Amino acid sequence: MRIALFHDDDPRIPRIRGELTERGHRVLVVGPGASHGFLARLFDEERPDIIHSFGRGFFGLASAAWWRQRLHAHGTRRVHDVDGVHFCDGHADGSLTGALLEARYLHVLGLR
């Protein structure tokens, strides 16, 4: 599974990236400073299955929501660390371990 972690300097990202990578997933970290042009090229080559948003800053909310809208028709789904956020397909608490996050992503993708 390809997973894009959109964040605004969330300290959990290294742990989450490591745990998901160890489980065999391709993890793309998108944070402050990522350019729209770079992401367009990257996502054209490697469309994420899941966009996981962290925080309430620009990348955690606005950028992740924009990419979800653009990629949703191609099967990309978005979860947010907090329940009740607009333009999300589900909730996935970033405090979960890699195995539990993986299960949550699979549920949102309709694979479990």
Image (spheres, rainbow, N blue to C red):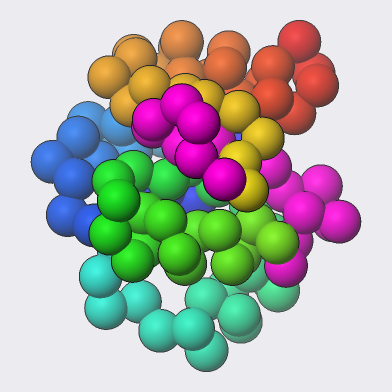
Quarter of the image with the N terminus is top right
Q: Residue 18: where, in percent of width, then height?
A: 30, 33
Specify the farthest residue to the right.
73
Of the pair 75 and 85, the residue shown nearer to us: 85
The quarter in which the C terminus is drawn is top right
Report x, y in % for residue 75: 81, 47
> Residue 82: x, y in percent?
39, 30
Q: Which residues are magenta?
A: 70-86
Q: Any magenta on residue 80? A: yes
Q: Is residue 5 found inside the magenta-colored segment of the image? A: no
Picture quarter containing residue 95?
A: top left
At x 69% / y 17%, what residue is drawn? 107
Q: Check the image and report above or below for 43 versus 12.
A: below
Residue drawn at (61%, 41%), measured in percent from left and top?
Answer: 88
Residue 28 in sight in this render: no
- Which image quadrant for residue 40? bottom right
Query: Left or right: 109 with respect to 48?
Result: right
**Height in image: 102 above or below 64?**
above
Judge left or right: residue 41 versus residue 96.
right
Query: Looking at the image, is 86 positioned above or below residue 82?
Result: below
Left or right: residue 9 versus residue 41 is left
Q: Which residue in the rendered view is the most extreme toward the left?
A: 11
